[in-house]
Amino acid sequence: MGHLLDRLRAGQVSDPPTPPSPVAPRRLAIPEHDPRNRLLVIDGSLPRPDRDSGSVRMLAILRLMREAGLDVDFLPEDGGEEGTDADALRALGVRVLGRSWSSMPASRLLRSAPHAGVLACRYHLARYWFPLLRQHASTTRRILDTVDLHFLREGREAELMNKAALARAARATRRQELEQIARADTTWVVSEVERDLLAELVPGATIEIVSNIHAPRATIPHFAQRHGVLFVGGGRHPPNADAVRWLVSGILPRLGEGKRQAIDVHLVGAGLQEALGGLSLPANVQVHGHVPDLSPLLERCRVGVAPLRFGAGVKGKINQYMSHGLPTVATSLAAEAMHLTDGQDVLLADDESGFAAAIERLHAEGDLWQRLSGHGLANIRRHFSEEAMLPAILRTFPPASTSIR
């Protein structure tokens, strides 16, 4: 990522602020319906954890907020309020503000439902809601959840593709995203890389790391019970579409060259067939499309892959693989800021031949597989668990009542 980040750093570079000291996770008893402890979360739609990594993260964040005793309203801008996704939020004690609220003038909503804080997911929603909050609810805390830094992801895509139009779009996104970060009382990012970059680009901004949240599986099927390679990623997300095309056209042809038995490859995600376009697939490659429950594939495959060539944030597919004890081959960019060491937690490769060789090695060597599987589970516990993320959430939303359960 080096030279692109250097170009993003304009002007004098200041030292990153010292992050707050970690606090021990706690559970709080907070009076029900106390407006000082009621939060409004605004996103484009309800979380759909069977569809994308961002939804897995959001559902876990909402669960943590409720476990901390905070009252939460969730406003999906598309008005969704029915079905299993809405039921999952209500089961957590989250109030879903459906069509009657999403169609209400924003000024009326803010006046009729007081909140201590509003969490806007992604900068484009903050562009709309933050000015309204300043006008109609000036004491309400404004929190921006970047999910990932869009301008960083777009800039990397523009550089890889060498397209001037993409570079112009990335610069426009950069300006708009940084404006909202400057307006926010607190901004959430998912990695130290993004925190440190924002410390330089928006001096004085309050930045917290609230990353992906996963629970490691207790039982992991053994190496000998598995076979095959797994790629997970929605094909409508540009980094995934590029990755699956590169996997099929550049990496897989080098996999198993000269060997009798081909390694099965499973491609999972909505829109992958369209992303692959006219690429021909060998018989050992299966495109599954959307799979509501990935557990069977995560438990039967031997290697997870993340051949991403651009992107930002941390990669939910890697978290998902590792939380199921599935060792991973990834590019350096895919593993960015995930606290992973090549050969200990993950195998890293950035060219087609090296990536294919790493897959073959991990698929064949049981001792290596076992080491990476165990270290991946430890990585989830240490860096991507509920216990690791709760302190930052509590610093963002200091509760009015602090009695301990």
Image (spheres, rainbow, N blue to C red):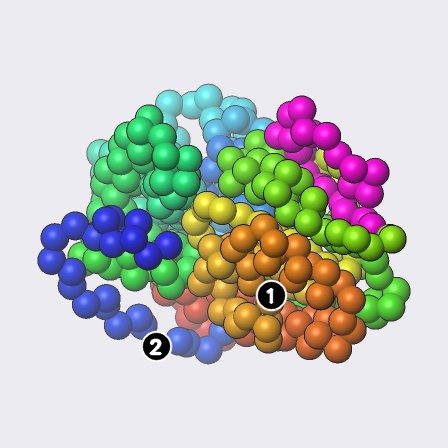
User: Which of the two residues, 276 or 208, is positioned nearer the viewer here?
Assistant: 276
Circle 2 sits in a helix, a strand or a loop, which is it? loop
Q: Residue at x 72, y 36 (%)?
A: 290
User: Which of the two residues, 335 or 402, is positioned nearer the viewer here?
Assistant: 335
Give how far across and how far down residue 169 sits, in percent: 32, 30
Q: Is residue 280 magenta?
A: yes
Q: Earlier in the sequence, mark 2 or mark 1?
A: 2
In the rendered image, is residue 126 in sight? Answer: no
Query: What are the residue bounds of the magenta stretch?
Result: 262-285
Q: Are marks 2 and 1 in contact (CB under 8 Å)?
A: no
Check the picture and name the quadrant holding the C terminus.
Answer: bottom right
Density class for disc 2 (Cα within 10 Å; few <14, some 14-19, many ≥20) is: few
169 relative to 351, above or below? above
Q: Is residue 45 magenta?
A: no
Which residue is denoted by mark 1 in the rendering? Answer: 347
For badge 1, the amino acid type reads Leu
Circle 1 sits in a helix, a strand or a loop, which is it? strand
